[in-house]
Amino acid sequence: MKIDQYILAIETSCDETAAAVIRNGQDVVANVVASQIESHKRFGGVVPEIASRHHVEQITIVVEETLTKANMTVSDMDGIAVTEGPGLVGALLVGVNAAKALAFAHQKPLIGVHHIAGHIYANRIEKEFSFPLLALVVSGGHTELVLMHEHGSFEIIGETRDDAAGEAYDKVARTLDLPYPGGPQIDQLAQSGEDNLNFPRAWLEDGSFDFSFSGLKSAVINTLHNAQQRNETLKNEDVAASFQASVIEVLTEKTYQAAKQYDVKQVVLAGGVAANKGLRHHLTQKFADESIELSIPPLWLCTDNAAMIGAAGSIAFDQGHRAGWDLNANPGLDLEKYSERSK
Amino acid sequence: MSILAIDTSNETLGVAIHDGAKTIAAYIANSKTKHSKRLMPVINQLMQDANMTPQDLTRIVVAKGPGSYTGVRIGLSTAKMMAWTLQIPVIGISSLETLALHAITQPELICPFFDARRGLVYTGLYQRRDAHQAKLIKDEQNVLMEDWLYELRELNQSILFLSPDLALYRDLIQSILGEKAIFPMEPFHHPSPALLAVAGSERAEDPVHQLTPNYLRLVEAEAKWLAKQKEHSNE
Ligand SMILES: [Zn+2]
């Protein structure tokens, strides 16, 4: 009989202080997220220094709550996993040093985890992976198509050349004077608007799986500006719907083409923008008649959390990754370099 | 008693293990960078040198700033989490007080400071209380060095200056305080983790969840926001 594996995971890469206990890489035993969103709302975005200050205030509280909920102790763990990067350096440092302290105090293995690997592995909490697998990663800092041939192996086959999709959402939301965070607001408005403003779709060269959103962002800003000059008012709902339609059409179409070209068995959606209703709906429709399986994580697994870091950390643990006591925060950690570790 | 003392709050990376009677092992490096990378390997090495395991520790003392925001958090994240999980007391001590302890045997007033850029310093004024405690005479603050020095001149007393950033302000101090300013030799300007351990050996513990850095300064965005709120309420 296989003995259960338990991983305690910590995530502090941006504005959520999070910890979780994961059993065998797929079962969430406990998951705690202390969100700072209310604090950052005042500033219309995440202020890195304030995020770091909250993390150091919250970290022991969040870990204690997690272990209490799991009814377990650090001694019961097989390893401690922590987000090593990418992210805000000051924020990452709190989690990394806290994780090292836990691992050192109990002489447990320490595992550094890539934040995006975590977002992708959030899907494995719901359903076992089938390879080859294609992940569409969309968040405030990322827009990528990641191909996986096996566990722990990540190949980026397409990525944004300028803004991340989530970044474009935030900028458009700010232009429309929507409250922070803007992404969900646009998604909401788009439900009751019409795609009637003919915003461009950035397909780039034939066969490219890369993305570009800066042109779209400029088109939105110019359209609003021109309307203002002519003393016309555009409905925010229509601007949101037209903008969102462009983003979603490109994301969905490129994901579909890549899935076909690489003959994948499963497509997974990952990252904060995976909570977008429009995107979830269109992907579901696009893959409805396909034999390719589509996984869309539940909302609580889309936003930053430590359960996903535990899920990715569990695989890394099985593959023998071990971080040394000199583990550091790596704000620019590259996914493909991280992937090299599993070889 | 086995005390682990950690200081990553400024340029110095300092770690010491003290048994209540003597310093068992200590490490100091004055190179500013990579505190996060180097702290745990140093702790690991010192514990090995002392032939101890983490479970042998009975208390953790940490320098809680002021200093580099990031540096302070590296020390605090480590100290808090280790103390919490080992279920032992944690004690946070001001980084300025730690530095002031270097002059604890002297009768003069003691002014420790750290550079805070653009002519500002983190500082406070201390004086010997007894053989191992300094008392605070003027509150710790983030202040323009020049203003602070004129304030100190009013006291008309000899003052010992201690700072790893002394070179930046030595001429200014001399020009305002003249003979009243005393500068000890170089090694005294770097905080000692062994002194930190001793300072924390008998102090009441901090509630671990509530132990926060001694930043002495608001985040700029927050300061602006608060000023704006105040403006609105005055309208
Ligand atoms: Zn994320």
Image (cartoon, coloured by chain):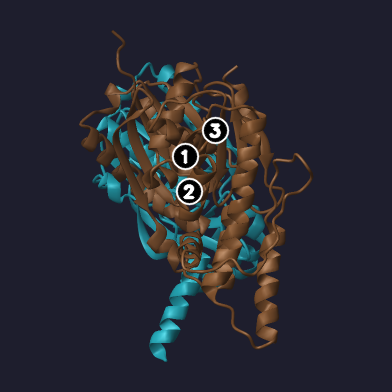
Specify the quadrant that holds the C terminus of chain B.
bottom left
Q: Residues within 10 Å of mark 2 (few under 14, many from 20)?
A: some
Specify the quadrant that holds the N terminus of chain B.
top left
Marks 2/1: CA–CA distance: 57 Å
Most extreme residue toward the right, as rendered?
A205
Q: Is residue A223 left or right of residue B177?
A: right
Residue tagged 2: A280
Mark 1, secondary structure of its residue: loop
Marks 3/2: CA–CA distance: 40 Å
Percent x, y of residue B67? 50, 52
Q: Which chain does the residue under circle 3 lie in?
A: B
Q: Which mark is residue B192?
A: 1
Q: Residues within 10 Å of mark 3 (few under 14, many from 20)?
A: some
Q: Amino acid at mark 1?
A: Ser
Q: Nearer the viewer, mark 3 or mark 1?
A: 3
Q: Are marks 3 and 2 in contact (CB under 8 Å)?
A: no
Q: Quadrant of residue A216?
A: bottom right
Q: Can residue A134 be seen here?
A: yes
Q: Is residue A162 left or right of residue A43?
A: right
Q: Are marks 2 and 1 in contact (CB under 8 Å)?
A: no
Percent x, y of residue A196? 61, 69
Q: Which chain is cyan?
A: B
